[in-house]
Image: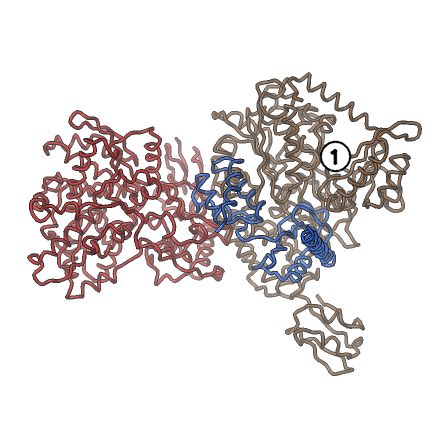
Chain colours: A blue, B brown, C red
Amino acid sequence: MLDQSYYDKTDEIIAVYGRKPSSLIPIMHDIQDTYRYLPGELLTYVAGQIGITEAKAYSVATFYENFSFEPKGKYVIKVCDGTACHVRKSTPVREYLCKELKLDDNKHTTDDLMFTVETVSCLGACGLAPALMVNDAVYSKMTPEKAADMLQDLRGREQKEQEGGSEE
Amino acid sequence: MRLESRAQAIAYRDQCLENIAQETCRILICGGTGCLAGGAGVLYQKFMKLVEGTDTRVQIGAEIAHLGVHKSGCHGFCEMGPLVRIEPYHFLYLKVQPEDCEEIFRETVLGGRPVERLMYHQEDKIYPTQEEIPFYARQTRVVLEHCGHIDAEHIDAAIAAGAYEAFAKALFTMTSEEIIKVVSDSGLRGRGGAGFPTGKKWSQVARQAEKTRYVVCNGDEGDPGAFMDRSIMEGDPHRMIEGMMIAAVATGAQEGYIYVRAEYPLAVERLKMAIAQAEELGMLGDHILGTDFSFHLHINRGAGAFVCGEGSALTGSIEGNRGMPRVKPPRTVEQGLWGKPTVLNNVETYANVPMIIMRGAEWFRSIGTEGSPGTKAFALTGNVCNTGLIEVPMGTTLREIVFDIGGGIKDGGTFKAVQTGGPSGGCLTKEHLDEPLDFESIKKFGSIIGSGGLVVMDNHTCMVEVARFFMSFTQRESCGKCVPCREGTKRMLEILERIVAGKGEEDDLYMLDEIGNMIKNMALCGLGKSAPLPVLSTMRYFREEYEEHIFQHKCRAHVCTAMQKYVIDPDLCKGCTKCARNCPVGAISGKVKEPHRIDSDKCIKCGACMSSCNFKAISVEA
Amino acid sequence: MGKIIIDGMEVEFTNEKNLLTIIKKAGIDIPTLCYIDELSTVGDCRMCTVEDDKGRMFASCSEEPRDGMVIFTNTRRLRKYRKLIIELLLAAHCQDCNTCSKNGDCRLQHMARRYGIMNVRFSDYRERLPQDHSSPSIIRDPNKCILCGNCVRVCEELEGIGAINFSKRGSEARVTPAFGKSIAETDCVGCGQCRVFCPTGAISIHHHRSWVWDALEDPELRVVAQVAPAVRVALGDAFEIPEGENVMGRIVNVLHRMGFDEVYDTTYGADLTIVEETKEFLERIESGKNLPLLTSCCPAWVKFVGEQFPEFIDNVSTCRSPQGMQSATVKEYFRDPANNPDGRKTVMVSIMPCTAKKMEKERENSYTRGEKDTDYVITSMELIEMITTSGIDFKNLDPEASDIPFGFGSGGGVIFGVSGGVTEAVLRNLTEGHSKEVLHNIVISGVRSDSAVREFTVNYKGTDLNICVVSGLAKARQIMEQVRSGEKKFHFIEVMACPGGCIMGGGQPIKIGRPHVQNRQEGIYRSDKMASVKKCGDNPMVLSLYGGFLKGKEHLLLHNSKFCAKNFR
């Protein structure tokens, strides 16, 4: 069960886009941006609020790759497997990340909810192939070695944040 | 401030020009996605700090210069990023690192002197300005003329460069018919793939009985290997917005939507800024420039579905539905968004419009070929030396693009093919190198221009694997609505996966052909109909590679791991047993101090033996 | 307007909306799995693709006819591609045809035969999913789904429910309720229209035949049947009997032969309903309260009101449905030892055109004196299967009359089977006399028409009564929203969930299209003509019951003490 704050926040988001069926996708985007996933209860709630059936909302949400009913990691790593990245060997990078983070085709998010690894069709950063994106930042010309450095860097950042947090 | 008339707009432009002229020395840091990824953001901070530390007016030689630091859009030369351009010298510095900033500042900004080590070199020649670099010198940058040269985050920079002049001309001096006539006469064809005449589309919308109309921009550049539209949205958003506004004037639309794919957060951000700034100036909104014309622009973020690049799927997605193509008729021009007549063009098409209005149809027709006038932006990627965004006249040959602009094949490989049109296209080979690239000719060879991705492939690329890659893409992105695409691509992928895994069967090529042609003829939407093209095209030009995979279990490009065979050279093997101990599956046998052997049935091709061998006795046979 | 050359034959067309219709008109059975005239055109299956003289291929369902077109519907390429499409569909479909409820009746199977598919070269890649038996009305077997989406469109476009939709995309796409819930957890009203439009066995009737067979063999039980009006004009479809022919006499015969002790006619229950509902209607007009009166015969509609328009619950007639009244009355009758000397337990088997009745009988208010009124509901389809199992030559049976006292019904009761019938029966009951002219005036009041929504006004003793007859819940939703907003005011609204009424119910033999609706409609109206008593209130058996054991029990047996839409167990 989600607490009331989730519904309050969702009401705020709905207010931005209006109670109409066409607001569904922008609302789902904002909910997911807020919680890093799309809680199913909120989707049902939104459907009722904007006047569409639950089945329709579910249908739209599952059509698009971006929406996830499972919580995603704090760092969402999107490994590009566009043509340019593919011919410049993006597969080993993804394989390295999955191996290192103990993820596979069915498991995309680490148990500590820190990392999610996804494959995307093209980031449009083909000049930087192979590329990947961590949240909104693009990393260029990746190799498994550079991916290792990147993970270390992100983990370091995380550790610092936590230490910083404990000092407060 | 709000501009209430054309005169005010002209006055505002003059003021912008004046303001910009104040900055006699400008540092333009490329703020395209590529360069930002390479650390351009840090460079920007660094230059800002450096400028802060000085008076913004500095002495350069005898002159006083006003300094400006700006984030520009993509220059297109992504391979060499991060890029920094210094005006008024047109110097372009490549691969700039934070530690280079002080030197640039000291030498060029304050001293007016070049930093040669950061300039483009080729065969010992230094190319100090961007315009001289072969990558640019051979291009005709019309649509991209301002990308990289203006501040992409401030409308004033765009206005100083001429933005919204064409719109004002259209709004104040032209009728709807006149606008459509110029666009029709120019021969502009849609840059999104199919090449439909833009003027014809607009006139079809304009003559609908229904008066509520929409202008929609397709910024869902989904083809892997394409980023032209992204660069325009990020680098010169006002040009595209202006094109949409002209379309709105021509067709009487009051509402516009820009659909941007989810993977382009920077484009969304820049467009939001651009719209907000244009609204503030009164260039967008109600009663634009004091007239009765009102136009409101909305941004819709995609959510990760390639098929939304298809027109009816895109409008469906804006309406809040699954992005699934629908049957036509009715067509989008008749019943598009919300069932109303809709102009739907892609980013590059709209970006072409302002200059057609300004310079006329004749000028536009003077570029490119008879049937395909104008230029085309291409994303040149893959195994080519200079990857990046280029713009050339339609009809430029593949050879000019790959070898003259692209600098040839990377790392000494040999040219094999160019994939055009992404997952909806096919490949062009050596025999097509001297063919002009335009809508008609490329179609003859079984491919399409598509949105403009050019992926160069060399002898290290396996064409069967490439076909598998594209099929896996279309299969994953199929909306699932019609049977041919949903089930057909699934089965084609199964067969291709089998072939690259060394388990191809005799009938497989026949089956690929049968299913491929069925999809091509029977699928519901354009994307579905073109889904088998990469396979059919590679089967047409590289059939022997398929046959080698199936019958000889051989991959000439050494890509398909299943085809690889690890062997130990008995002359080099010392019998140290290290490989056997490292093999995770016990595939290596042999007595101490005698040459070892690899059982290829057991071998999983992990390569552990090869990397452990101290005598380089293990190699891979294709 | 113009001419099209189809396979070398010149065919004229006028205002047909697509090429497919013209091809069909030309006498060519163009294959399709997803095109349905009543629904939106989606063009999913691509089977109706045709080729023109320039070798272009396009789906005929979505092609605008143009004068001078030259079309080929059966070329080498088309046969090859259609065959491949069917093969691909079969490959992604669990092929347990022998044990499938649709065996022999399946459109996919039919196409496979038609295109001569002798083997399937691909293996099924889809994960086997469990069947959904949660609904008392229908069973969903996702493994048999070919994703044509007919069910999704029917549920949304005709019924306005949208209980199911597509999820995911591409080869992972499935039809499912939200979040993979079971049907019982959705707003499904059990109308079964999805089953009517499903080309395969992916949606089938939740059948209860074996319980009925068991009951028939149990000597301790008195097994009683009631047969709904709509069943008699559809059952013949399965036995090479002309469409729409009333086969009630043969049904009575076959049921007797199968071992039913008594065979009654639900038109009797319908007559009771009209008597009660007319009373109720007059009371409400008098008091002005709870208007419009909403009919309560259709259980799918009742559930719909309860869930979608709960503020109108008090407007729903408190009358039980004809099935409910009939069962309760029959059971009460046999509770009297005088009528049940051997003390057998009575089992009521209700034979219905309807899948939602299976849900209705489970509702809490379908019980009297703690006993279930209706024990089993079997649909027309299930009865057909039982007849086939029994081996009885149905077609050549002699007709028999149903048993008294609950086997005699009026014409007003029979017309319950069509949309507008309840209203017409009420109007007859409200009107003095039963001359031809009186009846004709009612017919032309607007109650009978082809449209799904009929709004008309009749005058009753100086008061104008605004009446609305709707079939299809999507249309009902529109009307109810107009009523809610105050845009429209009615005194009486009759709603049947199935388009055309019970004759097109979810449990009937599958017939799609206007001509079939008309055949069944005409069959019902013919039966009305043949009835010696036209007005429900004139039924002598009903009158004698009111004078007899029903006295004082009207409320107990004929009305619902509380509204109950959803609470089936």
- Image coords of residue C269 (percent x, y): 16, 46
Asked which quadrant contains residue C108, the reply is: bottom left
Apparent side of residue C394 relative to residue A74 in the rendered image (left or right): left
Residue B409 seen from this side: yes
- Image coords of residue B36 (percent x, y): 73, 43
- Indicate the chain on which mark 1 is placed: B
Apparent side of residue C70 relative to residue B35 in the rendered image (left or right): left
Q: Mark 1: few, some, or many residues within 10 Å (few <14, many ≥20)?
A: some
Q: Depth check: give the residue in front, C148 or A95.
A: A95
Secondary structure under the numbered disc 1 in the rendered image: loop
Q: Depth check: give the residue in front, B289 or C283.
A: C283
Residue B539 seen from this side: no
Rendered view: A11 above or below C205: above
- Image coords of residue A79 (percent x, y): 65, 53
Rendered view: C437 above or below B402: above
The residue at 23%/47% (across/down) is C243
Q: Which residue is mark 1?
A: B141
Quarter holding the C terminus of chain B is: bottom right
Asked which quadrant contains residue A53, the reply is: top left
Q: Depth check: give the residue in front, B25 or C194.
A: B25
